[in-house]
């Protein structure tokens, strides 16, 4: 029997075409399965929503569904929100008004029983604020004063660094950092920020201002006041320490010297590096003292010369008024310039790095 009766090339070509078409339709399904959103929101009524949590604060939770729709829920409606593996593994809290069988969201938002590992490339960053708000997206700009994050909706949010507790890769900020912070709190319950302190010269220490007191003063008939700071040692650079996340007025001391304010208040958040820059003004103080003393002595000499060194007549010695006035002006200028410079304290600044 000839095998050509049973083998038809057309049948083979048709079979190969059907196989290729089947694979082409399966591939997009597999690709779609890999795009499962990474987060899950569980409401108190038992509803599950899968998507991307783009904002989470004590007041509300914003989630973007796979369809692109954005939904906003009050925080009181949400039982849990975050990475799918955390929310799905946590037991649901029973409620008095909850139905006996949970109501599920539409099938496209229903979480699978065994969620796959979500992709990290679409919205890789996150920002966590001191008030508990979390933002998910892509960080496009960051410096010591502010940070810009573009949310999955396309909106850009600009935040002050004094409000930021942590910023960086989403898996660190939203997963690792909150767990570490939940077990590391100060005595008052505030979240602790772990920071690294370095300096541009040796023998520097970082202090924080705990209290500022206005001390009244009296110069002649003029009343005034000066601010006196009370300091607490943080650590001596280089060092690593923990502070309650927040904004601080910091000070820098050199050796056994007194601490001096280091610029305006700065925000301290987890993972930051504080670089101490110290300004030694001893040469300026020396120049100010010489100006004050030398100028004052020169002006006093002019005044005395004008009073006793002038010509005499039958009424007595004539005062050289221009010389006396010039001496008085010299004394005044020397005091105005020399005294502030002679008492100008050392200073510094704290640079916040990421």
Image: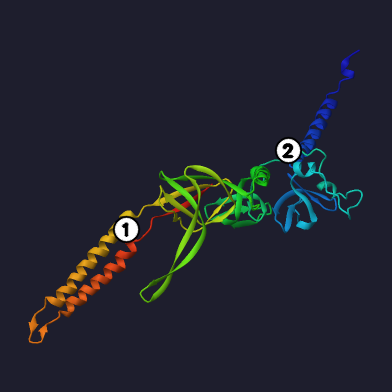
User: Is 20 located above or below residue 205 in the figure?
Assistant: above
Can you give x and y, in whole percent of width and height, for residue 117 in the image?
73, 38
Q: Which mark is residue 213?
A: none
The color scheme shown is rainbow
Q: As drawn, which residue projects farthest toward the top?
A: 1
Mark toward the start of the polypeptide (1 vs 2):
2
Task: Report which quarter residue 322 is drawn in.
Answer: bottom left
Residue drawn at (42%, 72%), measured in percent from left and top?
224
Q: CA distance from mark 1 to mark 2?
A: 64 Å
What kind of element bears circle 2? loop
Residue drawn at (34%, 64%), measured in percent from left and top?
340
Can you give x and y, in whole percent of width and height, for residue 22 in the image?
81, 34
The reply, left or right, for residue 73 in relation to residue 207 is: right
In this orientation, does residue 74 appear? no
In this orientation, does residue 165 appear? yes
Task: Report which quarter residue 88 is drawn in.
Answer: top right
Residue drawn at (63%, 54%), measured in percent from left and top?
130
Can you give x and y, in whole percent of width and height, for residue 92 in the image?
83, 47
What kind of element bears circle 1? helix
The nearer-to-camera label among 1 and 2 is 1
Q: Where is the N terminus found, in terms of image quarters?
A: top right
Front residue (pair 312, 245) = 312
Count numbered badges in the picture.
2
- Crowd band around label 1 with a 10 angstrom C-alpha radius: few (<14), some (14–19), many (20+): many
- Crowd band around label 2 with a 10 angstrom C-alpha radius: few (<14), some (14–19), many (20+): few
The reply, left or right, for residue 53 in relation to residue 140 is: right
The residue beneath circle 2 is 117
The residue beneath circle 1 is 285
Can you give x and y, in whole percent of width and height, for residue 160 in the image?
57, 57
Q: As drawn, which residue projects farthest toward the bottom?
A: 315
């Amino acid at each position: 029997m000839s095998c050509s009766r049973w083998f038809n090339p057309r049948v083979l070509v048709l079979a190969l075409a059907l196989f290729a078409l089947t694979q082409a339709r399966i591939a997009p399904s597999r690709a779609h399965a890999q795009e499962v959103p990474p987060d899950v929101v569980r409401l108190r009524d038992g509803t599950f929503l899968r998507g991307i949590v783009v904002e989470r604060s004590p007041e509300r939770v914003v989630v973007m569904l796979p369809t692109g729709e954005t939904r906003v829920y009050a925080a009181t409606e949400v039982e849990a929100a975050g990475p799918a593996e955390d929310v799905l593994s946590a037991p649901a809290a029973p409620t008095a008004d909850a139905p006996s069988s949970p109501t599920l969201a539409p099938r496209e938002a229903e979480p699978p029983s065994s969620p796959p590992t979500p992709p990290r490339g679409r919205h890789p960053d996150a920002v966590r604020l001191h008030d508990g708000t979390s933002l998910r997206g892509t960080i496009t700009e960051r410096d010591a004063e502010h940070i810009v994050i573009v949310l999955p909706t396309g909106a850009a949010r600009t935040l002050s660094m004094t409000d930021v507790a942590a910023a960086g890769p989403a898996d660190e900020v939203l997963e690792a950092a909150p767990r570490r912070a939940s077990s590391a709190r100060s005595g008052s319950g505030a979240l602790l920020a772990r920071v690294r302190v370095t300096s541009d010269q040796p023998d520097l220490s970082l202090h924080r201002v705990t209290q500022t007191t206005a001390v009244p003063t009296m110069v002649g008939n003029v009343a005034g006041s000066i601010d006196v700071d009370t300091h607490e040692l943080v650590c001596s650079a280089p060092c690593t320490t923990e502070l309650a996340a927040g904004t601080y007025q910091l000070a820098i001391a050199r050796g056994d010297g007194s601490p001096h304010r280091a610029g305006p208040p700065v925000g301290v958040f987890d993972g930051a590096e504080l670089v101490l820059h110290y300004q030694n003004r001893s040469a300026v103080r020396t120049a100010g003292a010489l100006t004050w003393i030398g100028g004052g002595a020169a002006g006093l000499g002019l005044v005395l010369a004008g009073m006793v060194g002038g010509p005499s007549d039958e009424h007595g010695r004539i005062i050289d008024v221009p010389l006396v006035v010039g001496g008085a002006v010299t004394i005044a200028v020397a005091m105005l310039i020399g005294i502030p410079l002679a008492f100008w304290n050392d200073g510094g600044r704290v640079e916040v790095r990421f």
